[in-house]
Image (spheres, rainbow, N blue to C red):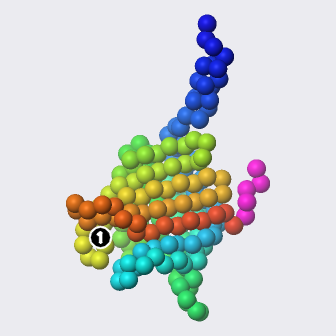
Amino acid sequence: MIKLSALLALVCILASAQTTPTRTQIYAAMTGQWTGHLEYRDYQSDERVLLPTWLEVKSSPDGNSVTFTYTYDDGPSKTVTEKSTITIDPAARTYTATSEGDHSSSTYQIEELTTGKRGIQITLSGHGTENDKPVDVRIRIRTDRNLYRFEKETRPAGKEFQFRDAYILTRRTPPQN
C-alpha cells in the first residue's frame, strides 16, 4: 500500500511537470504590449547601460510568426524603433529572428523549450558576430503571465560566456484572468 505522503509527493511532481509548448502557446505568451528596459554591455566602455523600452508583439495573420516592434528612449528628443519577425519551429527546434531594417536573419537551435508553472522557457544557442568577430551566442527567454525576460550571453571561441544584453519587461495592462 502506498503511503499518503508518497502519493502526495507524486501528485506534486506530476502537477509541476514541464511539457513542450506548441507554437501557438509560445506566440500567445509573447503577444501583447510590454514596457520596461533594455540593459546592454557597451562595446567601448564595457559598462552596462539601461534604456527605457516599449515592445509590441503581434501574431501574423497566418499564425506562423510574431512581429516584435521595439521602441527605445535613446536620449533627449531621440527615440529609435526596431522591428523584427520571429519564427519558431518547435518540431525542427529552431528560432529565427529576421530584422526588418537590414533584412539580416539569425537562426538559433532550441536547446530547451518547456512550459510549466512559471510559464514558457526557451534556451537558444547559435553563432553571431560581436565587434566584427565571431562569437557563440546563448539566449534565455522566459515569459509568464506578466513578465517577459530575454537574456543574451556571448563568448569568443575558448572563452566563458559574458552578459551581452537583457530585456526585462512587464505587460502594460495586466491580464483580466
Query: Mark 1 packing: few (<14 Cα in 10 Å), some, or many (20+)?
Result: few
**Residue 28, how many percent across, how many down?**
60, 53
Task: Determine whether the residue tagged by mark 1 lies in a helix, strand or loop.
Answer: strand
> In this figure, which residue is indicated by the disc labeled 1?
129
Residue 131 image-quadrant placement: bottom left
Where are the magenta residues, as a range?
173-177
Q: Does residue 100 appear in this view?
A: no
52 or 66: nearer the eye? Answer: 52
Which residue in the rendered view is the most extreme toward the left?
158
Left or right relative to 57: residue 84? left
Q: Does residue 135 appear in this view?
A: yes
Left or right relative to 48: residue 115? right
Which residue in the rendered view is the most extreme toward the bottom?
77
**Residue 153, how many percent across, how many down?**
38, 63
Q: Is residue 4 above or below residue 15?
A: above
Q: Is residue 16 above or below residue 73?
A: above
**Residue 98, how many percent across, how many down?**
41, 66
Which residue is depicted at the point 30% across and 64% down? 155
Q: Is residue 121 above or below residue 1?
A: below
**Residue 119, how many percent across, how many down?**
59, 48
Which residue is depicted at the point 45% across and 56% down? 140
Q: Is residue 174 magenta?
A: yes
90 or 77: nearer the eye? Answer: 77
Q: Main secondary structure of the magenta part?
A: loop
Q: Amino acid at mark 1?
A: Thr
Residue 168 image-quadrant placement: bottom right
